[in-house]
Amino acid sequence: MSRAGWRVEVAGDAAAVARRGAELLIDLARTKPGAHVALSGGSTPKAMYEVLRGASPEDMEALRQLHYHFGDERSVPNDHEESNVRLARDGFLGPLAIPEAHIHAPNGGATSLEDEADRLTRNLFKLMPSQAGRPVFDLIFLGMGTDGHTASLFPETKALRNRIPGFAANEVPQLATWRLTLTYPVLDTARRVAILATGANKAFVLGKIFQRFDDEDAVYPIEHLAGRDVLWLVDQDAARKIPGKETP
Ligand code: 6PG
């Protein structure tokens, strides 16, 4: 059963989820200098980045020792307002003066996203330890879309079937775009995955997902995460349809 590693923490609100996410990152920074982390995109991480900007000087120094990668990136240049890399640079990588050598940014503006995916994949194997031919992240942050996608593994897209560990260029017809995304074999090999999902608009999908006992009848991409430690950090609004987690 691939959900054996799943755990759910329900926090009061989105701000509490952001604090919990920041805590996971800071704890890793304090205990494992040089660890490799993948950041997620979308809007949810903004609140976590704001918490990180308020870290203590000692914790900021520890955060500078981590290596920052990205779980996915849109097909836009890194200075584009839609870029997940720009979101993180503006959010905390810049304000905390994280060394450039510790930022491993996908170039969504590359002329060939396939070549960029290959470059990123080579870089993963060069930079971090691997297990059974898969690079091992210490911590991967993910979000969840209202269609149950995660990273840029969108419903009915080719990357869902990609079992090659690394990055893939994934065509997303429903958005009329291409994305760069980590593939499931890398997500499932991470020592820990933390999924931050907040807001009432995530409640329906979370309710469906947690009504199932395993992924035999899974329909959403995020349901196929099968890592050893998958920690869902959700707020009460998002959790209200999760069996046993409903709030009065
Ligand atoms: C992206 C993200 C994506 C995101 C979800 C949730 O590039 O959009 O990587 O997977 O995490 O879409 O987005 P929100 O945080 O905006 O709800």
Image (cartoon, rainbow, N blue to C red):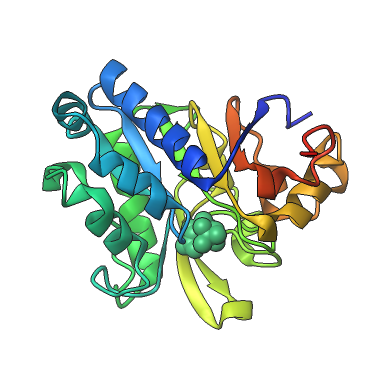
Residue furthest to the top in view is: 31
- Say which residue appears at 48% left-offset and 74% top-offset: 178
Q: Where residue 188 appears, x then y in whole percent?
A: 57, 36
Relative horizontal placement of residue 201, taking residue 104 as reference (left or right): right
- Say which residue appears at 23% left-offset and 71% top-offset: 79
Relative horizontal placement of residue 236, taking residue 89 as reference (left or right): right
Image quadrant for the C terminus? Answer: top right
Q: Where residue 32 appears, x then y in whole percent?
A: 29, 19
Residue 235 seen from this side: yes
The image quarter in which residue 105 lies: bottom left
Residue 104 seen from this side: no
The image quarter in which residue 219 lies: bottom right
Q: Where residue 95 appears, x then y in whole percent?
A: 16, 49
Q: In this picture, is 171 found above or below 129?
A: below
Image quadrant for the N terminus? Answer: top right
Q: In this picture, is 93 found above or below 3?
A: below
In-front residue for pair 124/103: 103
Q: Where residue 193 appears, x then y in whole percent?
A: 52, 35
Relative horizontal placement of residue 35, taking residue 239 as reference (left or right): left
Residue furthest to the bottom in view is: 176
- Say which residue appears at 79% left-offset and 41% top-offset: 242
- Say which residue appears at 24% left-offset and 39% top-offset: 54
Relative horizontal placement of residue 53, taking residue 228 as reference (left or right): left
